[in-house]
Image (cartoon, rainbow, N blue to C red):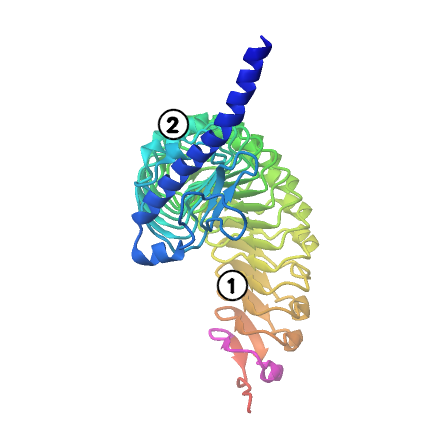
Amino acid sequence: MTGLLLFFCVFVMVTSPHADAKNQGNEADALLKWKASFDKQSKEILSSWIGNNPCSSIGLSWEGIICDNNSKSINKIDLTSFELKGTLQSLNFSSLPKIQKLVLRNNFFYGVIPYHIGVMSNLNTLDFSQNYLYGSIPNSIGNLSKLSHIDLSENDISGIIPFEIGMLANISILLLYNNTLTGHIPREIGKLVNVKELYFGMNSLYGFIPQEIGFLKQVGELDLSVNHFSGPIPSTIGNLSNLRHLYLHSSHLTGNIPTEVGNLYSLQSFQLLRNNLSGPIPSSIGNLVNLDNILLQINNLSGPIPSTIGNLTNLTWLQLFSNALSGNIPTVMNKLTNFRILELDDNNFTGQLPLNICVSGELTWFTASNNHLSGSIPKQLGSLSMLLHLNLSKNMFEGNIPVEFGQLNVLEDLDLSENFLNGTIPAMFGQLNHLETLNLSHNNLSGTIPFRYG
């Protein structure tokens, strides 16, 4: 027994270095063959890829290749922004058995993603983004069970999202945006319970957003925007308690905004613009006290702005224009003092502007044109020292233009046209040195518009 054990130890000592060398040779052969398929400039960029040992000592190692110190095998390939041009067809993935990270981001790779990429069983990061790849996502991608990060964004990849993607139980980041993907989002997406970032925007996906999206309780960023969906936003979206950023804009969605969005307590960005949504803005939106921006413009929303919006004291950006909203602008909006952008145009709002609606030193853009607002223009608007753009045209405002507008020192555009304003045009407009556009037409004003000289 002792002799047998001694023989085994000697055998391991003799054969292990040989195995390492053989593996290094296989890796080198695979990469050199791949390099040989590139164009001339790319070969010159990879001039360090020579010999038969990609894992040489520092100074001799191959650029973009990172090796494991113990096994002397390649475990990372990172060729980000090398300006390489070629395909993936000549890369023998099976000769890179221990690779964990393959990053080819921002190059000129074209052609299809080979089916045999599915043999890379140890891969945890796959990034082919910002290239010119086309064809479909191979369903063999489901074999890469250790994947935690996959980025195929900004290519020309077409076809469907394979249902095998649901087998990637460890996936944390899944980025497929800005391609030409079609078909439905597979219901198997609900199996990706560890995903934190899911970006499918800027494709041609259609059909319903699956109810199973509600199983992604770890997701913090969800982007399904700029697609061709039909049907409503699923109510199960309210289960995404860790969601911080929701992008569903420009996707042909219909129906009401589900009241369950009020359960998204972590939400900071709420962007549903450019859809066919109807019905009211749910009052449950007032639960989302972490919201920074609400973008609901260019829909068919109706009813009033819910008074619960006064709870959203962190709100900096609210766009509700081009809907069918009605009623008074709630006075609780006086509490929202952190606005930078507020756009209420092209609705059916009535009544007066709340006196302190825009008491915010940060507000740069305020529009409420083409409504049925009446009364006088609040003089408090003159305290908005950072205001660049103000449009209150096509309403029923009356009375004088507040002299306080002379304090709007950085104002570039002012449109008060098509109201019932009267009195004289204030001389202080001549002091607004940054004013580029001034429209006071179709009112009952008298006097002349003062000119700036010099």
Would you name the residue on which mark 1 appears? 395
**Residue 90 x, y percent position in the rendering:** 30, 41
Q: Which mark is residue 163?
A: 2
Amino acid found under the numbered disc labelled 2: Phe
Residue 269 falls within the magenta-colored stretch: no
399 lies above or below 345: below
Residue 5 visible within the image = yes
Q: CA distance from mark 1 to mark 2?
A: 53 Å
Which secondary structure, mark 1?
A: loop
Q: Amino acid at mark 1?
A: Asn
Foreground: 58 or 389?
A: 58
Task: Determine the residue positioned at 35% across, 29% down.
Answer: 139
Mark linked to residue 265:
none
Front residue of 89/357: it is 89
Magenta stretch: includes residue 432: yes
Q: Residue furthest front?
A: 3
Do the CB atoms of the residues marked 1 and 2 lie less than 8 Å apart? no
The stretch in magenta equals: 425-443
Which quadrant of the figure contains the N terminus?
Answer: top right
Across and down, in percent, residue 142 comes to 41, 28
Kindly give the residue lying farthest to the top in the view shown: 1
